[in-house]
Image (spheres, rainbow, N blue to C red):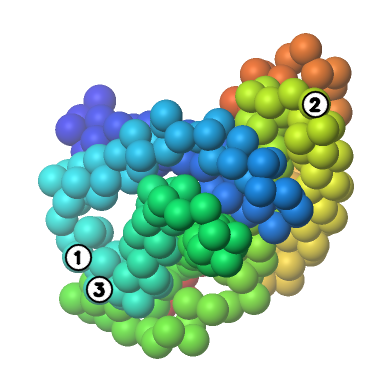
Amino acid sequence: MDLNTTWFILLGILFFGYALLDGFDLGVGMLHLFTNTDEHRRLMLNSIGPVWDGNEVWLVTGGGALFAAFPPVYATLFSGFYLPLMLLLTALIFRAVAIEFRSKRPDAWWRRSWDAAFLAGSLLAALLLGITVGNLARGIPLDSSHEFSGSLFDLLSPYSAMVGVTTVALFMMHGSIYVVMKTEGPLHDQARKLGAQHDDLLHHLLRHYDNGHAALCPAHGRAVQGPSVLFGVALLNMLPSPIFPVRFSTSAIGEPSSLRACPSSA
C-alpha cells in the first residue's frame, strides 16, 4: 500500500470520527427546537458539556491532515468552498459561545437568545456539511489548473440540497439517540419519540434521494440498489432500547457510506 492510499484511509477515519462524534453534538443542538422548558435544554447541554469541544478536534485534525497529504485538494476545496466554509466556521463559533454564555445570567431573554444561537449554529453547520458532501459526491467544475470554475449557485444544486437536508435529519436522529442514552424521565421519553419521528423522516428522504440520484446520474441508475448502509441503520434503529449504544454508533455512518458520486460536470 503506497503513501497516498495510507493518507486517504487516515483521512477517511478522521472525517468518519468527526461525523460520529460531533454529529450527535449538532443533533442535540437542533433538538432544542423541540424542547419547551429551560430545565430540559439545560439537561441536554449538560449531556454534551464534557465532550463537545473535544469532538470538534476531529474536524481540525482532518483539515490539517488534508493540507499535509493532498495540498492541491486542500487548495481547491478551500478556495471553491470559501463562503460555505466561512459560514460553517461562524456557525461553530456561535455554538461554542452559546454553550459557554447561556448560564452566565438568569434572565429568561438572555437564555432564550443563546438557545436560539445554539440552535441556529447547529442547524447551519449540519446543513452546510451535508451540502459540501453532496457537492463532492456529485462533482464540481474545475478548470485545467484544478481551480474551481463555478459559482456559488453551482454549489446549491437540488442534489446537494437534498443531501444537506438528509444530513440534518440523520444528525437529529443521532442526537436523539444520544439524549436517550444520557437522560431519564420526561426528557428521555420525548427524545425517544423525536428519534422515531426523525427515523421516519430519514426513510422518506432516502426514497427521494434514490429517485433524485437516478434522475441526476442516469448512468448510475438508482443509488440504493442492493445492500445500503442507510437501510441497515434504519433497521437497527427499530430494535429495542437495550442496544442503544449500537444504534448510536451506526446512526452516524449511513450517509457517507450510501452516497455514490455522480460524474463531474467539469
Q: CA distance from mark 2 to mark 3?
A: 48 Å
The residue lying toward the viewer, choosing from 108 and 234, is 108
Q: Mark 1: few, some, or many residues within 10 Å (few <14, many ≥20)? A: some
Does dot 3 land on a helix, a strand or a loop? helix
| Mark 1 residue element | helix
Tell me the crowding category of disc 3: few under 14, some 14 to 19, or many 20 or more residues within 10 angstroms, Cα based. Answer: few
Residue type, label 3: Ser
As drawn, is 77 to the left or to the right of 91?
left
In-image side of 3 versus 266 (left or right):
left
The answer to whether 116 is drawn above or below residue 245 in the figure is below
**Label 2 SS:** loop
* Position of residue 216 measured from the top left corner of the image (x, y, whole percent): 66, 72
Quarter of the rendering containing residue 189: top right
Q: Which mark is residue 79?
A: 3
* The C terminus lies in quadrant: bottom left
Could you tell me which residue is drawn at 85 percent across and 18 percent down?
A: 240
- State the residue at coordinates (25%, 30%): 6
Q: Disc 1 vs disc 3: Cβ atoms closer than 8 Å?
A: yes
Disc 1 from disc 3: Cα separation? 6 Å
Q: Quadrant of residue 227?
A: top right
Of badges 2 and 3, the one in the foreground is 2
> Would residue 152 be visible to someone looking at this image?
yes
Circle 2: residue type: Gly
Closer to the chain start, of discs 2 and 1, is: 1
Residue 31 higher or lower than 131, as above or below: above
Which is nearer the eye, 65 or 200? 200
| First in residue order: circle 2 vs circle 3 | 3
Mark seen at residue 75: 1
For the N terminus, give its image quadrant: top left
**The disc label shown at residue 185, or none:** 2
Give how far across and how far down residue 241 sits, in percent: 80, 18
Exactly how many numbered labels are in the figure? 3
